[in-house]
Image (cartoon, rainbow, N blue to C red):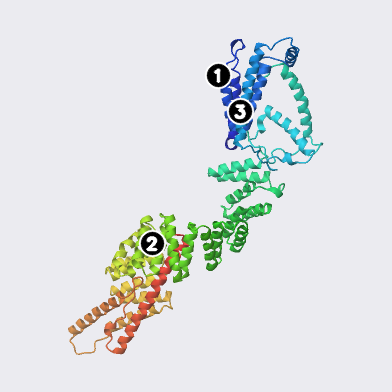
C-alpha cells in the first residue's frame, strides 16, 4: 500500500532528511559559515515542499539544531546575553551574529516558499468536508479532546512508526467523544513528557529519530485506492479483497447525509468486479442499491445498475433505473442510447428508435446510436426509412472506417433496394477489411447467384468454407452451383453429403442429394431418398411432387412398349426416351434459383395441351416457392449475423 498511495509523503521525507543533513555541513572551521550547504538546503526544502507541504517544516528543525546543538546554546545563556545587550553592557558575540545571519537566510527562504505556495492555490484555502477532518466539525468537547489526542498519537508514531499513513481522513483516528475515554490518559502523559523533554533538549544535545512510511487499516479511502491500483494491473482477485475491506472499514451509514460520489465509488467498483461472476449478480445489484440508498442522486449507480439488470434479463427494472438517471441528467446521450437498448429487449422497436433519435440529437455522431438505429430501420422493413438508415451508416463508417460491419450493412441495404452493383462494392469492402467476415462472404455469393453470376460466387464460397467448413447454407449454395452451372455432379454430391454429416435431418441437403441420385440415373436410390426426405418434412408439397415424378419415370421405363417396332428399335427408343427425360429434368431444374435444387417433372412425355399446361403450372409453382425460399434464406442469414454479433 505504501508503494501505491504514499509516494508523495515518502519523497517529501527523503528530501526533508537530505535538507537537514545538508544543513549540518554549514558550519566550517572556526565556526565560519559554509554557504554551499545552506544553498543546497534551501533547494532541497523547496523540493520537499513541492512533494508534500510538510516538507517546509524542516526549516524549523534546522533552526533548533543551529541554536541548541551546533552552537550549544542553552536558555540561560541566551537569556543572559539578551539582558546584557538590552542594558547596553555588551555587544552581540560574532558567533551569535553568524548564527542570526544563517537563521535569517533560512527564514527568508521559508517566507518565499510560503508566498509561492499561496500563489499556486490562488490565495484560497482548500475546502475540507467531514470526511477529510471529522474532528473539525465535531461539537465540544469531542473537538478539543480529539485535537489534543492527535499530539500523543503523532509523538508515538515518531517513536514507533508502524501505523504511519499518507492519508489521515475519514475514520483513520476515531473521535475522542468523552472525558472518560481511556485515550485521554495518553494525552496527559504526552504533555507531562513534553515538558520534561523541552527542558532536557534545551540543556543537552540529542539524536534525531529516523522515520519510515507505512500502510493505516482504518482508512477506507486507502483500501479503495489500492483496489484501483490493483484493478489497473489486472489483478482483480486482490483488488476485490481491498474493495471488500474498504466497505467493511467504511460501511457508509455514519455519514449517510453527506456521502461524496468518490467515496461511493467503493461500492460501484466492488459491484463491477463481482458482476463478472454470473453466480454473484444479485450480490452486485445489492451493492448498487446500497450506493443509491446512500445518495439517491448518484447517477453512475443508476447507469451501472441498469446495465446489470439487462444482464440479469430484467429489462423492466433496467428501464426504471435509466429513467431515474435521465431525471438527473437529460443531456447524456449515452443514457438515451442505453434506454433504447432496453426497449429493444422489450420488443418495442418504435420506442427504441425514438430514444436512438434522442441520443443523436444530443450527439449527432454517437457511433453506437448511428449503427444500431440504422439496423433497426433496416429490420423494420419500411422502405421509407432506408434512405435515413443509409445516411446513418455512411456517417458511422466516417467515424469508424475500419469497421467492416458498417460496410456490410450498407451492402444489405443496397440488396434490399435491388442495387446490385452498389451492394457488391460494399460487400467487397467489408471482406477486404475482414477477410473471414462470415455473413459478408455468404451474402456476396448469394448476390452473385441471384444475378446470374453463379460462377463468380464459387471462389467466394470457397473462401467462406475455408474459414467456416460447417457453413450449411454455403455448402447448399455451392452444391447447387456445381450441379446446375458446372455440371459437377461429384462435387455437388460431396457438398450435400457433408451437410448430412453435420445434420442428418437437414431437409434441404437431403432433398438435394436425392436430386443428385436422379442425375446419376439411380432412380431407385432417388425414390428411396425422397421417401426418407418426405418423412422428415411430410407437409412439404414440393417433395411429394418430386417423388411422384421419380416414380412416374420408374414406371414408364419398366412398362412394355406397345408397338410393332422391332425389339432393337424398341430398346433404342426406350433409351432415347430415357435420355430425353433426364434432359428435360435438367432444363426444368436449371430454371430454379440456386439455393435449392428440384427434380424435373418430365414434361417431354406430355403429348396433350392439358398435360402441358399442368406441367407449366407446376414449374411456375416451383419457381414461386423457390423465390420465397431464397428471400427467407437471405433474411435468416441476416438474423443469424445479428444474433452472432457480427
CA gap, disc 3 to disc 1?
Answer: 19 Å
Q: Which residue is mark 1?
A: 36
Taking the spot 75% from the left edge, 41% from the top edge, the residue there is 138
Taking the spot 49% from the left edge, 63% from the top edge, the residue there is 373
Q: Which residue is mark 2?
A: 440
* Left or right of 139 on screen, residue 98: left
Looking at the picture, how far across and down is residue 436, in whole percent?
38, 57
Q: Earlier in the sequence, mark 3 or mark 1?
A: 1
- Per the image, label 1 sits on a secondary structure element best described as helix
Q: Earlier in the sequence, mark 2 or mark 3?
A: 3
Q: Quadrant of residue 108?
A: top right
Q: Does residue 317 sit above or below 185 in this rendering?
A: below
* Left or right of 567 on screen, residue 8: right
CA gap, disc 2 to disc 1?
Answer: 75 Å
Taking the spot 76% from the left edge, 38% from the top edge, the residue there is 143
Q: Nearer the viewer, residue 490 or 235?
A: 235
Q: Does residue 500 sit above or below 238 in this rendering?
A: below
Q: Are marks 3 and 1 in contact (CB under 8 Å)?
A: no
Q: What mark, if any, has residue 568 been given in the picture? A: none
- Per the image, label 3 sits on a secondary structure element best described as helix
Q: Does residue 540 sit above or below 486 in this rendering?
A: below
Q: Which residue is mark 3?
A: 112
Q: Does residue 2 sit above or below 281 in this rendering?
A: above
Looking at the picture, how far across and down is residue 18, in whole percent?
58, 24
Amino acid at each position: 500500500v505504501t508503494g501505491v498511495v504514499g509516494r508523495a509523503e515518502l519523497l517529501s521525507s527523503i528530501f526533508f532528511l537530505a535538507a537537514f543533513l545538508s544543513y549540518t555541513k554549514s558550519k566550517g572551521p572556526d565556526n565560519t559559515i559554509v554557504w554551499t550547504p545552506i544553498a543546497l538546503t534551501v533547494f532541497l526544502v523547496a523540493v520537499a515542499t513541492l512533494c508534500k507541504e510538510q516538507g517546509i517544516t524542516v526549516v524549523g528543525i534546522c533552526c533548533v539544531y543551529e541554536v541548541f546543538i551546533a552552537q550549544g546554546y542553552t536558555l540561560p545563556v541566551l537569556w543572559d546575553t539578551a539582558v546584557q545587550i538590552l542594558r547596553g553592557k555588551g555587544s552581540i558575540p560574532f558567533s551569535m551574529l553568524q548564527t542570526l545571519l544563517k537563521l535569517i537566510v533560512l527564514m527568508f527562504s521559508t517566507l518565499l516558499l510560503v508566498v509561492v505556495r499561496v500563489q499556486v492555490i490562488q490565495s484560497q484555502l482548500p475546502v475540507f468536508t467531514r470526511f477529510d477532518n471529522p474532528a473539525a466539525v465535531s461539537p465540544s468537547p469531542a473537538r478539543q479532546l480529539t485535537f489534543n489526542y492527535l499530539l500523543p498519537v503523532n509523538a508515538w508514531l515518531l517513536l514507533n512508526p508502524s501505523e504511519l499513513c499518507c492519508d489521515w481522513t475519514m475514520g483513520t483516528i476515531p473521535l475522542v467523544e468523552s472525558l472518560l475515554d481511556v485515550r485521554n490518559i495518553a494525552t496527559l502523559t504526552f504533555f507531562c513528557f513534553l515538558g520534561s523533554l523541552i527542558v532536557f533538549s534545551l540543556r543537552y544535545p540529542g539524536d534525531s529519530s529516523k522515520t519510515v512510511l507505512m500502510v493505516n487499516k482504518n482508512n477506507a479511502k486507502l483500501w479503495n485506492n489500492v483496489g484501483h491500483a490493483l484493478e489497473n494491473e489486472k489483478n482483480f482477485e486482490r483488488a476485490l479483497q481491498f474493495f471488500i475491506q474498504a466497505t467493511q472499514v467504511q460501511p457508509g451509514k455514519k455519514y449517510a447525509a453527506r456521502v461524496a460520489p468518490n467515496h461511493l465509488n467503493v461500492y460501484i467498483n466492488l459491484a463491477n468486479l463481482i458482476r463478472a461472476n454470473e453466480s454473484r449478480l444479485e450480490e452486485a445489484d445489492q451493492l448498487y442499491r446500497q450506493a443509491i440508498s446512500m445518495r439517491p442522486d448518484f447517477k453512475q449507480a443508476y447507469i451501472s445498475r441498469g446495465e446489470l439488470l439487462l444482464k440479469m434479463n430484467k429489462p423492466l427494472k433496467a428501464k426504471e433505473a435509466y429513467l431515474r438517471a435521465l431525471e438527473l441528467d437529460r443531456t447524456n446521450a449515452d443514457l438515451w442510447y442505453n434506454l433504447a437498448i432496453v426497449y429493444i429487449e422489450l420488443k418495442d422497436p418504435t420506442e427504441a428508435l425514438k430514444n436512438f433519435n434522442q441520443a443523436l440529437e444530443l450527439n449527432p455522431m454517437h457511433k453506437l446510436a448511428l449503427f444500431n438505429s440504422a439496423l433497426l430501420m433496416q429490420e423494420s422493413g419500411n422502405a421509407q426509412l432506408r434512405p435515413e438508415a443509409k445516411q446513418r451508416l455512411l456517417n458511422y463508417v466516417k467515424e469508424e472506417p475500419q469497421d467492416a460491419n458498417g460496410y456490410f450493412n450498407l451492402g444489405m441495404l443496397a440488396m434490399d433496394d435491388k442495387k446490385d452493383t452498389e451492394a457488391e462494392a460494399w460487400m467487397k469492402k467489408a471482406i477486404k477489411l475482414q477477410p473471414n467476415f462470415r455473413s459478408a462472404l455468404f451474402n456476396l455469393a448469394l448476390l452473385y447467384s441471384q444475378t446470374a453470376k453463379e460462377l463468380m460466387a464459387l471462389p467466394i464460397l470457397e473462401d467462406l468454407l475455408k474459414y467456416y467448413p460447417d457453413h450449411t447454407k454455403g455448402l447448399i449454395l455451392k452444391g447447387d452451383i456445381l450441379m446446375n452451372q458446372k455440371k459437377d455432379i461429384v462435387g455437388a454430391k460431396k457438398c450435400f453429403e457433408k451437410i448430412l454429416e453435420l445434420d442428418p435431418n437437414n431437409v434441404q441437403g437431403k432433398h438435394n442429394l436425392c436430386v443428385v441420385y436422379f442425375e446419376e440415373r439411380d432412380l431407385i436410390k432417388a425414390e428411396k431418398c425422397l421417401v426418407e426426405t418426405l418423412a422428415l418434412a411430410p407437409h412439404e408439397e414440393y417433395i411429394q411432387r418430386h417423388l411422384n415424378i421419380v416414380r412416374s419415370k420408374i414406371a414408364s421405363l419398366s412398362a412394355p412398349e406397345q408397338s410393332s417396332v422391332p425389339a432393337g428399335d424398341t430398346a433404342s427408343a426406350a433409351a432415347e426416351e430415357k435420355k430425353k427425360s433426364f434432359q428435360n429434368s435438367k432444363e426444368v431444374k436449371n430454371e430454379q434459383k440456386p439455393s435449392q435444387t428440384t427434380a424435373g417433372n418430365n414434361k417431354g412425355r406430355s403429348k396433350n395441351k392439358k398435360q402441358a399446361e399442368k406441367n407449366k403450372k407446376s414449374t411456375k409453382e416451383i419457381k414461386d416457392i423457390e423465390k420465397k425460399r431464397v428471400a427467407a434464406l437471405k433474411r435468416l442469414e441476416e438474423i443469424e449475423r445479428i444474433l452472432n454479433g457480427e
